[in-house]
Structure formats: structure tokens, C-alpha cells
Amino acid sequence: TQLLEQSPQFLSIQEGENLTVYCNSSSVFSSLQWYRQEPGEGPVLLVTVVTGGEVKKLKRLTFQFGDARKDSSLHITAAQTGDTGLYLCAGYYGQNFVFGPGTRLSVLP
Amino acid sequence: DVKVTQSSRYLVKRTGEKVFLECVQDMDHENMFWYRQDPGLGLRLIYFSYDVKMKEKGDIPEGYSVSREKKERFSLILESASTNQTSMYLCASKPTSGRARRYEQYFGPGTRLTVT
């Protein structure tokens, strides 16, 4: 069974702070995706990374795929209240996706 | 923009009822998926389909079946609903080709099913 672990499980910060959340596995993935999910809604795709060491930026969000394609990080600069949500990582292995349990982020005004 | 729609946002059914959840995508994606999401357990794959009339079991197919008669539509069927099938059900689709695009799943808004 391929497992993805995410840390921290919960994170509560003030608006304007920076933060990093992590997604780790012992398995090698063909690609890794990050999603944000708001309560009562489906996950929304933020980014896909496919190359080991790849870094992608989406406004204040920076995503990195580990060199060995086993882990990834998401860094948010100057967090805003609109960043609040559940952040999920998913790795593509074999034919399908494996999802991590998520990091629940609360950004307080 | 990719759009994945699900037939109901909220559904309440009684134990033993047959339940149909429908999903439609408008981007001509070959692959479609059904997941359930439960607190503490994350997203778990129930079934997926990579083509019309094709289906494959995911990690937790027991108690469920699926139907894909048209490319844009993927239905999840609970033959006899039970209380342990109370959950958030999420449908997703993705294309087959494209270096990065083929890994990009697009989700519907979800159906919150309660079985009493």
C-alpha cells in the first residue's frame, strides 16, 4: 500500500505570516498534485508537478517536488484569510492516485 | 474551464433503498472516478473507468456498482444503502494524454449522502 503523509495535520496562523506544509512518502510517484478543498465542496486542483526537483509558483504559493519524487512541499507567503481550507496532496502511482489525509489551514484576520 | 457536475448536493435515503449518484463532465475526458471522503480516512477510490462501458474496482468497491454508458457520464449505484455508506461522494475526471495534464483530476462539488 502506498501511503502519503501530510504534516502538520492542523495549522492556525495570523494573516500575513508565511507557512510550509509537507507531503511525504516512501514510494516514488510519477507525479504529485496539490488541491485545496473548502467545507462542503470538492477539491480544486492547484498544481501538478512531474519532474524531480521541480518548483512551480502560483502567485503567493510555491510548490516543490522532491528530487527523488517521494515528497513535496507547499509554501505560502503572506497568508490571507482566503487561503483557509484543507490542503490535499495526491500522488500518481501505477494506474491511480493516492491521497494524503490533508493539512487543515486556518488563517485568522 | 473543466466542469464536473453531480446530480445532487445533499441526499437523504433510508436503509435498503437503491441510490443513484450521477456525474457529468464536459471536457471529453476519458477517465472518470468515484471517491468517498470520510473524516480521518481521507479520499478513498471506489471505482474508476477509463473508457465507455469499462470499469475497474478501486480500493473499496464493496456495496457499490457503476455504469458508464456515455463518455461524459459516470453513475455510482448503491444497490441497498446502509448506514455505513453515509459519506461525502466525489466524482472526478481526467484526460489520458498530456505530459502534466494526464495527471490532473477535476472534481465535482460532491454529494453529501446520509443513510438513515
Image (tube, coloured by chain):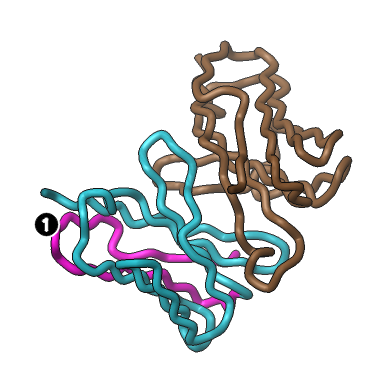
Where B50 falls versus A3 (above or below)? above
Q: Is residue A16 found inside the magenta-colored segment of the image?
A: yes
Q: Residue at x 48, y 87 (%)?
A: A53
Was residue A90 drawn as part of the magenta stretch in this picture?
Answer: no
Helix, strand or loop at label 1? It is: strand
Residue at 36% in and 73% down = A62
The picture's colour for chain B is brown
Measuring from the top left, give residue A81's x and y in whole percent. 21, 50
Residue B3 horizontal side relative to residue A22, left or right: right
- The amino acid beneath tag 1 is Gln
Report the label total: 1
Image quadrant where residue A101 sits: bottom left
Residue A37 as seen in the image, left or right of residue B19: left
* Chain letter behind tag 1: A
Question: In which image quadrant can residue B66 be found?
Answer: top right
In the image, the segment drawn in magenta is: A1-29
Q: Position of residue A108 (x, y in %)?
A: 13, 49
Chain shown cyan: that is: A
Q: Which residue is rendered at x = 52% and y = 15% of the image?
A: B12
Neighbor class of circle 1 (other Cα within 10 Å; few <14, some 14-19, many 20+) is some
In screen coordinates, is A41 left or right of A93? left
Quarter of the view holding residue A1: bottom right
Q: Which residue is mark 1?
A: A14
**Residue A109 drawn at (x, y percent):** 11, 49
Question: Of A69 and B9, which appears nearest the observer?
Answer: B9
User: Residue A37 in the image: x percent, y percent?
Assistant: 41, 47
A58 left or right of A43 in image = left
